[in-house]
Amino acid sequence: MNIGRRERRALGAAVGLLADRALGEPRVEPHPIAVLGDLLVRVEHRMWRKTRRRGVAYALVGTSIGAGAGAAVRSTAVATYLSTSGRMLGETAMDVARALGRDDLDGARALLPTLVGRDPSGLGVDEIARAVIESVAENTVDAVVAPALWGAFAGAPGALGHRALNTLDSLVGHRSDRYEEFGWASARADDVAAWIPARATALLVAAARPARATDVWRIVRRDASAHPSPNGGVAEAAYAAALDLRLGGTNRYSERVEDRGELGDGKPPSPADIERAVRLLRDVTLVLAGVLGAFGCR
């Protein structure tokens, strides 16, 4: 019975991934994930204290809310569909690419905060392209691979529990005076939850671009550790190798400047490379859906 349950979960996660590719975000108001995010914000306002202990409690409560929502949904396919947003990620990246294609630099800068947290005001065309491709790479883990694998492993509670935890990291996991202590647990827990999915992402990138598989393995091993994120560096290094680009460098955020090292041996990215990254995102999603579906149907 346990084997059958694992197979059903894997098949459900595959169906959820394919639903996201085919349908995109649910066309309902309010969006279920937006409702979850609003609830987590309200909980934060009640629980916030400038201590790690209170932050640990918030991480546990928030993740439990997501897992509880998954238990209520029950369907792994539905929960995975709600938790993944690969198609929207690709569409948003292409919106920026089209603005750059029209030489609308101001428009591209205005769109960029929907993808990344860095300050867009001083970024030129190629730096915007780099920011978009890095966001696509990093969010391949958070928005596609991790929720699907957690759904395959733990069913609907796993998929929506991960989505809640990733939302907590987005809300409070960044470095600031308010969240330095309170957000520590959410940030660390999100890193742990994405550790295996990030490395699975590198394998999926290699499978989606087999001619570059050796380079993906080499660049991830050599360069990923230069990135401050234990998971983002793996995904970005894999994309850099698969697309024959050089990613990384200095990023300016509202309150800090961060050196992310150099990832890859290729050329600096240009706007034309955004579409290549989006195609890679699509192919990684389809490879993962195929692997999960094969396991579920065995």
Image: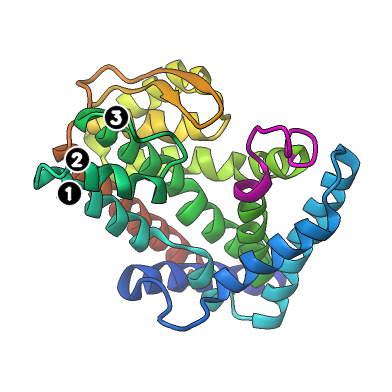
282 in relation to 246, above or below: below
How was this image coloured? rainbow
Real-space CA distance between mark 3 and mark 1, rounded to the nearest whole angstrom:
14 Å
| 156 horizontally vs 224: left or right | right
Q: Give the residue drawn at x 60%, y 80%.
A: 75
Q: In the drawing, what numbered circle is on residue 123?
A: 3
The foreground one among 286 and 124 is 124
The foreground one among 102 and 278 is 102
Task: Give x and y (percent) for residue 243.
Answer: 24, 33
Q: Amino acid at mark 1?
A: Ala
| Residue highlighted by disc 1 | 99
Q: Give the residue drawn at x 35%, y 35%.
A: 120
| 293 horizontally vs 54: left or right | left
> Given the current orientation, which residue lies at the most extreme left position?
102
259 in relation to 96, above or below: above
Q: Is residue 181 magenta?
A: yes
Let me know if residue 96 appears in the view.
yes
Q: Is residue 62 magenta?
A: no
State yes or no: discs 2 and 1 in contact (Cβ < 8 Å): yes
Q: Which residues are magenta?
A: 169-183
| Residue highlighted by disc 2 | 105
Task: Give x and y (percent) for residue 284.
Answer: 35, 51
- Say which label, 3 or 1, has the lower sequence index: 1
Give SS at disc 2.
Answer: helix
Label 3, residues with CA under 10 Å away: few <14, some 14-19, many ≥20: some
Give SS at disc 3.
Answer: loop
| 263 horizontally vs 83: left or right | left
The foreground one among 59 and 76 is 59
Q: Give the residue drawn at x 14%, y 39%.
A: 272
